[in-house]
Image (spheres, helix red, strand yellow):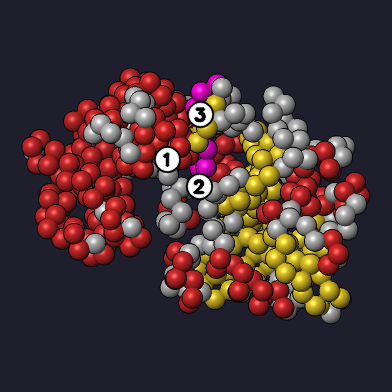
């Protein structure tokens, strides 16, 4: 069981000062970089777990685990405000362990404070709270556990000792930015697992607490570990760097993405009918913001408007559906049994309600297409055709494997499908939308990389001009 209480003064007032100094240096800190200077850190709620959940009885290290939910407010925070999860492990100063931050003098005495994301006591607490490993010794559950290097927006922990149907262990993802209500990285993988689809790591459980009456907030997700898996982006970069074709792997990835969209239609509630004017208005608003922030886009604004005007005149009121929302090669693992897709949280920079909203499946296709461009650039593909070949293979197999867009759950009104020319126009607009986002990002962070997405913007606009 868990208890949720106001975090003011818990576990000690000095913790608030500690967090204000420590949080901005974390890779997952939502504000990031120099923008963290104007961010206010306000402890909101504290979550504690009873002895059965914490596993203290069979761990024996005397650690206390408290999960703080902290409001971050300021101009540098996406949307102006987010809630971050900060799990802490408190021990006697003589029992410093992994993730040690500092020692604090509190009213109850001196304590050593640890980042719970790196500490086995926190991992065990979350496993127990998810209902996993009952009757299994706590040390066995966390043995050989380690944090995945390079994770940025969350903290992922490999736990070979966690029980799973195939005996491969578990992957515990500690969500660092949390939102009240159903979490897509719980809801979607659970639905796909229940549907029997093996294109995602099997969903094993989640930690959810009641933060407001009738409202749950997800803190962590446990899925089955994919053994000997490779990150899709790293794998593609290696192929690109060696000048080795990625077409066969890209084609199989296209099949898996098509299956994802087909199963989601059946496993998730149907979305609303698309309103062409509203849909295109969203793309247009994002384009206007991009042009305002990236000077290099100004001359292209008329062509962008023309492409979007053309799309609005073509789109029918087809039914939207649940999609991945932020699909790219880094959200795919390639293991012994092929591709697995993960991380269904949506674009981290978009508001929570937008990230989980039904959309066109082509949004995911566009994200993957842009990812091949970055793999070619980062990997240093010696042949410019490497990217085009991968995209062609991926898109060809996706189109071959995709079920009709009008496939609906039983009892749902049938909606029109996208004819091929309209599907091409919609995909072009969504690739453009993603590339414009990348132009802004590169303008801010890596100006010498702007040419990568800018060339994609020009290719889309030139192709649209030729086909009108």
On residue 345, the disc is 2
C-alpha separation, residue under disc 3 versus residue under disc 2:
20 Å
**Front residue of 229 and 255:** 229
Q: Is residue 327 above or below residue 4?
A: above
C-alpha separation, residue under disc 2 versus residue under disc 1:
10 Å
Q: Which residue has dot 3 on it?
A: 334
**In what element is the residue under mark 3?**
strand
Picture quadrant of residue 250: top left
Magenta range: 337-345
Q: Nearer the viewer, mark 3 or mark 2?
A: 3
Residue drawn where x is 70% and y is 66% of the image:
101
Badge count: 3
Q: Earlier in the sequence, mark 1 or mark 3?
A: 1
Q: Which residue has dot 1 on it?
A: 327
The C terminus lies in which quarter of the figure? top left
Picture quadrant of residue 15: bottom right
Q: Earlier in the sequence, mark 2 or mark 1?
A: 1
Q: Position of residue 133 (x, y in %)?
A: 80, 38
């Amino acid at each position: 069981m868990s208890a949720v209480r106001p975090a003011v003064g818990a576990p000690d007032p000095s913790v608030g000062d500690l967090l204000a100094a420590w949080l901005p240096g974390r890779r997952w800190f939502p504000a990031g970089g120099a923008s963290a200077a104007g961010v206010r850190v306000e402890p909101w709620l504290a979550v504690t777990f009873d002895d059965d959940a914490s596993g203290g009885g069979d761990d024996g290290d005397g650690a206390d685990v408290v999960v703080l939910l902290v409001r971050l407010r300021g101009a540098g925070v996406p949307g102006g405000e987010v809630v971050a999860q900060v799990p802490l492990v408190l021990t006697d100063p003589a029992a410093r362990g992994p993730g040690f931050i500092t020692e604090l003098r509190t009213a109850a005495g001196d304590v050593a404070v640890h980042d719970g994301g790196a500490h086995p006591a926190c991992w065990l607490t979350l496993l127990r709270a998810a209902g996993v490993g009952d009757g299994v010794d706590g040390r066995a559950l966390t043995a050989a556990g380690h944090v995945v290097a390079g994770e940025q927006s969350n903290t992922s922990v490999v736990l070979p000792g966690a029980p799973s149907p195939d005996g491969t262990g578990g992957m515990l993802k500690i969500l660092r930015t949390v939102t009240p209500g159903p979490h897509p990285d719980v809801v979607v993988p659970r639905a796909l697992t229940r549907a029997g689809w093996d294109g995602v790591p099997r969903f094993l459980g989640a930690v959810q607490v009641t933060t407001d009456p009738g409202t749950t907030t997800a803190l962590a997700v446990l899925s089955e570990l994919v053994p000997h898996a490779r990150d899709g982006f790293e794998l593609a970069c290696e192929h690109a760097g060696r000048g080795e074709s990625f077409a066969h792997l890209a084609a199989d990835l296209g099949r898996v993405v098509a299956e994802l969209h087909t199963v989601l239609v059946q496993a998730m509630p149907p979305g609303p009918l698309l309103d062409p004017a509203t849909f295109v208005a969203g793309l247009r608003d994002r384009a206007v913001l991009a042009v305002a922030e990236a000077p290099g886009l100004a001359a292209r604004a008329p062509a962008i408007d023309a492409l979007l005007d053309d799309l609005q005149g073509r789109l029918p009121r087809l039914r939207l559906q649940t999609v991945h929302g932020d699909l790219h090669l880094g959200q795919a693992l390639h293991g012994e049994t092929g591709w697995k897709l993960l991380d269904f949280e949506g674009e981290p920079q978009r508001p929570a309600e937008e990230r989980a909203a039904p959309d066109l499946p082509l949004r995911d296709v566009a994200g993957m297409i842009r990812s091949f461009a970055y793999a070619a650039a980062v990997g240093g593909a010696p042949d410019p055709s490497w990217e085009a070949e991968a995209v062609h293979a991926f898109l060809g197999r996706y189109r071959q494997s995709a079920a009709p867009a009008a496939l609906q759950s039983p009892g749902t009104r049938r909606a029109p499908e996208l004819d091929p020319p309209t599907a091409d126009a919609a995909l072009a607009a969504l690739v453009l939308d993603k590339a414009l986002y990348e132009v802004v990002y590169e303008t801010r962070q890596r100006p010498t990389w702007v040419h990568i997405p800018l060339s994609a913007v020009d290719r889309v606009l030139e192709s649209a001009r030729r086909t009108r």
